[in-house]
Image: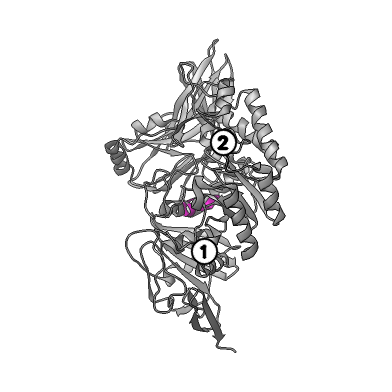
Amino acid sequence: MKIFGKNLELGKDSVDIGNIRIIASVIRDDGFRIEFSLENLSNDSNFVGKFELGELDSSNTLFMNNYQSWGPCTFVKPKEVFASIQKAKFPAGFAMSPVPEEFKKGLISDYFIASDKEFAGFLSSRHAHPYFLWKNGIIEIKIHVGKTLEAGEKLELDPLWVKSYDSLEEVLDKYAQKVATQNIPRIGKPVFGWSSWYDYYLDISQKAFLDELKEVRDLKMNYELFQIDDGYESDIGDWLETNEKFPEGLEFIAKKIRELGMIPGIWTAPFSVSETSNLFKDHPDWIVRDKSGKPLVAYENWNKKIYALDTTNPNALNWLEGVFSTLKNYGFDFFKIDFLFAGMISGKRHLDDSPVEAYRMGMEKIRKAVGDSHILGCGAPLLSSIGYVDSMRIGADTALNWNGMDVGQPSAKYSIRNALTRHFMNDVWWTNDPDCAMVRSRKAELTSHSLSASPLKNELKNERMVNVYVPALLNGHFIESDKLSKLSQGDIHFLKSALNFRNGRSHVEFVDPERYVIVSQKTINGDVISFVNLSDSPWNLKIEEFSSLLSKKEEEFFISYPSMREINRFDVQNVDPHSILIVLYRGKRKITREDEGKEDGRDFHYYGSDDT
């Protein structure tokens, strides 16, 4: 590793770039910790944009991370991926990076990166956006500040931690702890809930929502949270004005949820302002603008241009606080705030704060307004959100189809992949939200295998099971999104069986970019080891190969779920493509099982053991 073009060594060094001096102080910290600061040496104000701080050696494969919730966190062959992006002419926007122009030069990994021998990660993002740019086989360590320093002004930047490693999983755990120490995280309780999005999408209505509440009462599913998602608002930005499908308003909805003893949840995109919204028409001066003074498009969605709220404008901040105070007074206690990256785009604002500082001003105002209520971040800059959110989406939107583009687009596969690669953040920075689980068998494009369809004869584990069981095993949020009235008895049994794998402490091991091992201790079903195969090829393995993860005695044995068939740890087990093999630890008691299938899709299992 090099800092300012010199090999890394303890002590202090500096470099002048124009009238800006960058200072680096290096100390030992189970590796190396590097503190950076900037100083404007001139007698005039100076705008500070992007700077290179140093370099890392690359390798053929890198572990890379995108800055926001939907973006990938995965193993990448950078030369191949960059070539494919160039060939496809993929238009990188603010959703992919606060500095999308850098994608013309190479590949960006935000906040942290790992080669095959070295890990580097920034410990916070409070003033500037730190990132790594792979370019022509070299990894540049960079920051984007995006603000003006007055004459003689100094700015402390976010520290960088660097360490050589043998185990990527271990170094990620250490990194997570160091980030937590540098910041003050909020860690919310994992909830079991329901969301309207993945079956209704924008077609949700007051009548449909009340029908779902009636189903909850009849099913007695013990949901803790019931959340209304996108589709209730009159426009993006006009959060307190409902459309014609919700004639009695949001307070009525919150009251109906509370009457059933559940937490009322609501979706907003607080830093997004539609070009057709009343907010934009009434307050065009509250919008982030480009260099020419025109409203800057943060992204496009809902067939509209979406602008970004200027969270340095005191009037906009007061409005933001008023919106969330009102929603809280209505009775909502769980706030899913989405498309948050819009608050961090580069542009002209009321105050000359950096985009990161502006984003954090907005997040602080929302946190103040909702108090101790639960905030779930989504589409959010990860490091900059620590301390403001109780939970965080950590992957792309899920979908009813398996594949998709690994650039934050909806995909069941990549949603689950990110839940595995970013699991080290769970219960350290926040509670992870792997996005919704869909248990329905109707209109499902994911391959399906009913648990009641002769499981002793068919060991197939499938995409639908991966989508539902992995979130349960990882024990973050478990939020289901189905029309409850359309669920069969088999679907309900499927859901309840997955819930029995929650409440444990989990650890994820990376076998390769598409195969993972989850070790879950003290779930409702006891200790579990699961093998997740996201690839298109079968995975043949022996449980014994992973004995170091188990801490079990040789004479103890394992049982395959859902067949409840005993497995010899030395025998080869097959994990089909797009599948999961779940193995229960059952100590020394051998269990026998008899099955009885019902016509309505339910299956009954009768167990005995060798000591009864």
Q: List the single residue furthest toward the top.
A: 43
Q: Does residue 277 appear in this view? A: yes
Residue 129 is situated, as x and y percent measured from the top left of the image, at: 50, 32
Q: Is residue 428 magenta?
A: no
The amino acid type of the residue labelled 1 equals Leu
Q: Is residue 422 magenta?
A: yes
Binning the other alpha carbons within 10 Å of mark 1 as few (below 14), some (14 to 19) or many (20 upward) gives some
Q: Residue at point 57% right, 15% down?
A: 150
Binning the other alpha carbons within 10 Å of mark 2 as few (below 14), some (14 to 19) or many (20 upward) gives some
Q: Residue at point 52% right, 24% down?
A: 288
Q: CA distance from mark 2 to mark 1?
A: 30 Å
Residue 57 is situated, as x and y percent measured from the top left of the image, at: 37, 40
Q: Secondary structure at mark 1?
A: loop
Residue 37 is situated, as x and y percent measured from the top left of the image, at: 55, 27
Among numbered discs 2 and 1, the one appearing first in the sequence: 2
Residue 599 is situated, as x and y percent measured from the top left of the image, at: 48, 77
**In the picture shown, does residue 259 fall above or below 35?**
below
Q: Tell which of 353 and 61 is nearer to you.
A: 353
Q: Tell which of 552 and 185 is nearer to you.
A: 185
Q: Which residues are magenta?
A: 419-425
Quadrant in which residue 370 is drawn: top right
- Predominant SS along the magenta part: helix
The amino acid type of the residue labelled 2 equals Ser
Q: Which residue is mark 1?
A: 487
Q: Which residue is mark 2?
A: 234
